[in-house]
Amino acid sequence: MLTHHTGFQWDASGFMTLWDELTDALGGDPYAWLWGHVHNGIVYKSPLTMPGTNGQPRTTTTFARCLGHSALPYGEATVLKGNPGIRWMETGTGLLPNGFGTLRFILDGNGMVVGIMEHFFHLGTTAPVFSSRLF
């Protein structure tokens, strides 16, 4: 799933109505959801439990990512430090380097997808600052 707006609060404190609307339309949580909107690069943990829009705890195994770190202004979100729902985030002082994310689909000999790698980069660099296998 790719959207501009977030499926849950950027600090992983609760699901938003958009999450309910899209998961209802899909018949369940998406495998992965990448959004922008918030000016930061954030990788959320999976599984992740937080309050649903009804206030009750809800758990998702969706691989959720914020890819808003190509926008300005953009600085470290110190409120996220030590947040148990965050796996990785851009850090540093002052304005942080703009970045982007890529997905690399790994194919077998028959052209079937057998894996997906994600990479976060800073502009002008060739080595990723974060990588993981989504599938």
Image (cartoon, grey):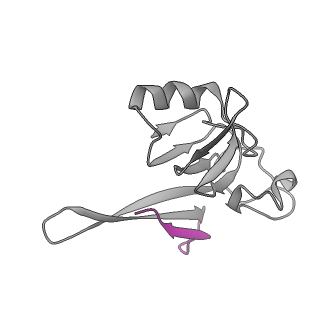
Residue 22's place in the image compared with 36, above or below, is: above
In which quarter of the view is residue 90 placed?
bottom right
Kindly identify the residue that appears in the image at 45 percent across and 42 percent down: 30
Residue 57's place in the image compared with 105, above or below, is: above
Across and down, in percent, residue 129 comes to 62, 70
Kindly identify the residue that appears in the image at 83 percent across and 60 percent down: 81
Answer whether residue 131 is magenta in the image.
yes
Report the front residue among 42 and 25: 25
In which quarter of the view is residue 76 placed?
bottom right
Across and down, in percent, residue 3 comes to 52, 35
Across and down, in percent, residue 28 comes to 44, 36
Give the extent of the magenta segment: 124-135
Kindly identify the residue that appears in the image at 45 percent across and 62 percent down: 134
Q: In which quarter of the image is the N terminus?
A: top left
Q: In which quarter of the image is the C terminus?
A: bottom left
Across and down, in percent, residue 125 comes to 58, 70
Q: Is the magenta stretch mostly helix, strand or loop?
A: loop
